[in-house]
Image (cartoon, grey):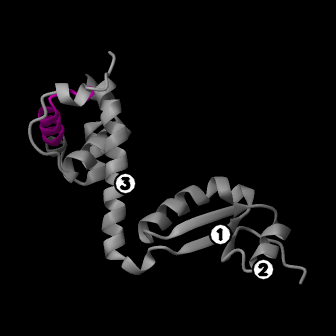
Amino acid sequence: MTIQANYITEMAYTGSVSYRHIRCFLEVARLSSVGQAATALAISQPAVSKTLRELEDRLGQRLFERSGRRLRLNTAGRLFQSHAGQSLAELERGIRAIAHPGAAGRTIAVGVLPTVATEVMPRAAQEFRRSAPGTTLRITTGPNWLLLSQLREARLDLVVGRLAAPDQ
């Protein structure tokens, strides 16, 4: 199936799409399961099914291919997912910025060892973004000596990892 530039104007869009629709859609897309999405969203399976049905009806498009209890995004679903994910992320950033207005514009420089960078930092950075919207996290990886040197020079605000005792 080819999606053309005039795709949106040709579909039968009827009604508004809510935050609830987008969250539900993205969880089902991520987990490929209504049941698992219901658990993740802390709502019932019928509520997830109803929300997906409403969304598809409002968009005038089916977004998933259904195979038993598994759902897989179809072409329209993949297209919608990319835009819905970006929209939801921006909306949540805006909500957090309002909740934490003083955090906007700050940068925190973190030094991490390479092992920490791959094992710990992805999840830590994600949690940090949630808790400190508007604050930029700048991550530098490197060996102990470099990170400690940059910390002493105030080029880093903190260093994370199992570090050897400093020489000085």
Does the rendering let one see residue 116? yes
Percent across and percent down for residue 6 are 26, 26
- Which residue is at the front of the view, 34 or 123? 123
Task: Give the residue at mark 2.
Answer: 153
Q: Secondary structure at mark 1?
A: strand
- Examine the structure image and report whether residue 68 is included in the region drawn in magenta: no
Q: Of the two numbered discs 3 and 1 on the same chain, state the one appearing first in sequence.
A: 3
In the rendered image, the vertical position of residue 48 relative to residue 102, given as above or below? above
Residue 127 - label: none
Q: Which quadrant is home to the N terminus?
A: top left
Task: Give the residue at mark 1.
Answer: 110
CA–CA distance in space, label 2 to label 3: 35 Å
- Examine the structure image and report whether residue 53 is included in the region drawn in magenta: yes
| Residue 58 location, quadrant | top left
Residue lying at the far top in this picture: please name it. 1
Q: Of the two numbered discs 2 and 3 on the same chain, state the one appearing first in sequence.
A: 3
Percent across and percent down for residue 124 are 54, 63
Q: Of the two numbered discs 1 and 2 on the same chain, state the one appearing first in sequence.
A: 1
- The magenta segment is 49-64
Task: Give the residue at mark 3.
Answer: 89
User: Pointers 2 and 3 in contact (CB under 8 A)?
Assistant: no
User: Pointers 1 and 2 in contact (CB under 8 A)?
Assistant: no
Q: Secondary structure at mark 3?
A: helix
| Residue 99 location, quadrant | bottom left
